[in-house]
Amino acid sequence: MTMSTFLHQHVSLDDLPFRDSTHNYLFLGGVGLLSLLLLNYTYLVLAYHRAHSKENKTNGQLPPHYPFFLPFFGPLLQIWWDHGGFAHRVSSYAGKLTSNRFSVFGHTFYNFQDRETIEKLFKHPALSSSINMYSYVNSYLLGTPNYAMGVYRADDSGPFPHPHAKSSVLPHNRIDHITHHSVFRGLTGPGLQPSGLRFAQNLHRRLDELDIPEDWVHKPDFTTFFREVVGAAALEAILGPAMLRLNPTFVKDIFKFDHMFPTFGPGLPRFMMPESYSFRDGLVQQFKNWYKHARKNYDASQTFADGDGDPWWGSTMMRLRQDSIKGADNQDDESLARVDLGLAWAIIGNVVTSSMFSAFHVFKDKDLLSRVQQELTEHVGPDGTLKDVDPHKLGKDATLLLSVYAETLRKYIKVYSVYSTPHEDVDLGKWVLPKGELAILNSDPCHRDENFWNTRNGRHPLDGFWAERFIVDPQDPDSGPINRACRQKALPQEKLASGKPFFSTEGCDGAWIPYGGGFSMCPGRFLAKNIIVYSSAVLASKFDIDIEPDTIAFTKKRYGMGVEDLAGPIPFRIRKRATSPK
Ligand code: HEM
């Protein structure tokens, strides 16, 4: 029976709201579609609850499908409207973090958020590669040309020195391993301590150049101050002075790029965002200019005394990437400049604003500030100066500043990390991740898990900032980051025996995850910690700072990429401390 016959037999047109039949057909079609959608949605909701009711009874299940009213578009509207709210809904069930999957435009995402699963996921060797994420970032966000993307898309050999047994990728095309090896060497291996020391020198030099007087000076924006001082010092520590000298607008440009970064996410073509595309091309050109110059001038004899840096390539890591990455098929200056742009973004993308927030909280709370200053005096001695302190050492010893650092990342880092399994299904205990599927996890719901974190019975809510959250006081059983019921790991005996309060993230493995986790965990995490702790330390010891606003507003435009975008400037005033060390 056609729609028309059905209408004539069962429905009088007078019952319908429109005079002409076309509109009435459309109206009825709409009602029919809506009913189908409602029926489908009711079924999905029931299936969802049913799946969660068995959640703790069986192992190896597929995570339940999170129900959406519009099947194909999934959560798009919710993400657009309130990404953070959606992330929390899709990550919990009956007040507890859990795992769910959802689909957008036919792509399924396995959203793993319960702690036990996250811990298993981080340890599973089949999930060690971030090559999928890498491919997406390189092509969509950085604009790496298609001819060069082939090796990224084809590499299923994994990040380890030995390729996966089922992979046939040639050694020189093992781009996953090649890139990881280079950043591990530069950021977690022999390059780490020298980079930190170069950062410290650059930071002191840049602050000295500002020549801040002993009388108050007003500045329009604390974030811009951090970009120009901490951001530039960090970039120079890795890319070196020549890059910044040759491209005087580079520091400003990379932060502008950071701001526009999310707009490249959906992969819109050039004609829809020509200005952003050509701005990004301009940045890539800055890298290419630098390569030419560094190749011409580099001389191994000029390597710095730290054994890692040099005046042209900045660090051994940047120099070695020239050969290792370009050794893979179809790589050239253009493609290398794109991935180096990505690395430069990674250097500043989160650490600069996180450093700013760490300092923001230290200076906003006068009591905290004086305890930080006291801690620093104990480190450097009454006549000492932070110029003599290795950031790597401070990043291990400064208990209070370390706790401020960890709490800053807990509160402000809202980041997705992505995992995939190209060769096999992965057993994660309660849940399973099928071969070829994409797992995601989001730090935000974990960082605000009321069931896990210590809030001292609600006195230090997770939306707030508690500078001491990550300090364990052996004399106080209620101290430390984890609430009593969730503490599973024993704390280091020698630290407890010392009787002195100490910094700890012990036992927070699947809960404090600002850097992702597992093998593909952020390799810049140690440098990031040292930068954040050292920046607050230097400012607290050298300057008085009054920050105007008490709270900070965000745009919500880059939820899931780390620190969110600030909605406006943070005016402040600054002066040199009368007792400031040199
Ligand atoms: C607060 C600061 C930072 C945060 C929150 C952060 C977070 C992250 C996260 C979540 C990832 C993805 C990890 C994964 O896929 O599991 C990542 C990757 C990466 N980060 Fe960081 N990061 C920070 C600072 C830095 C710094 C300072 C550097 C460099 C000096 C850096 C270099 C990198 C690199 C190179 C990657 C890609 C690693 C790969 O090859 O897969 N990060 N970061």
Image: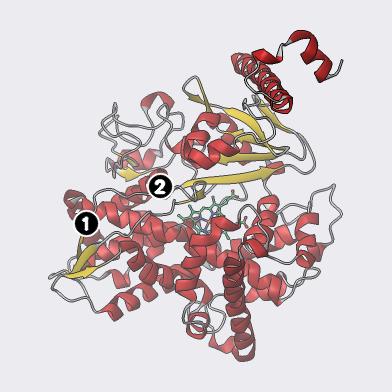
**Picture quarter containing residue 173?**
bottom right
Q: What residue type is labelled 2?
A: Tyr
Q: Nearer the viewer, mark 2 or mark 1?
A: 1
- 191 and 490: which is toward the camera: 191
- 321 and 5: which is toward the camera: 5
Q: Going 62% across and 73% down the picture, which residue do you hit?
A: 281
Left or right: where does residue 6 sit relative to residue 235?
right
**Residue 223 position in % (x across, y down):** 35, 62
The colour mode here is secondary structure
Q: In which quarter of the image is the N terminus?
A: top right
Left or right: where does residue 268 sit relative to residue 254?
right
Left or right: where does residue 265 sit relative to residue 477?
right
Q: What residue type is labelled 1?
A: Glu
Neighbour class for label 1 at 10 Å: few (<14), some, many (≥20)?
Answer: few
Res. 559 visible in picture? yes
Q: In which quarter of the image is the C terminus?
A: bottom left
Task: Determine whether 562 is above or below 333 in the image.
Answer: above
Query: Which residue is denoted by mark 1 in the rendering?
Result: 548
Q: How far apart are marks 2 and 1 (CA)?
A: 20 Å
Q: Going 80% across and 9% down the picture, which residue do you hit?
A: 9
Task: Determine whether 111 is above or below 282 in the image.
Answer: above
Q: Does the residue labelled 2 lie within 8 Å of ligand 1?
A: no
Res. 507 visible in picture? no
Q: Which mark is residue 211?
A: none
| Upstream in sequence: badge 2 or badge 1 | 2
Q: Is mark 2 on a helix, strand or loop?
A: helix
Q: Going 71% across and 59% down the picture, which residue do you hit?
A: 177
Query: Which residue is denoted by mark 2 in the rendering?
Result: 412
Task: Determine whether 226 is above or below 204 in the image.
Answer: above
- 386 and 324: which is toward the camera: 324
**Residue 40 position in % (x across, y down):** 68, 20
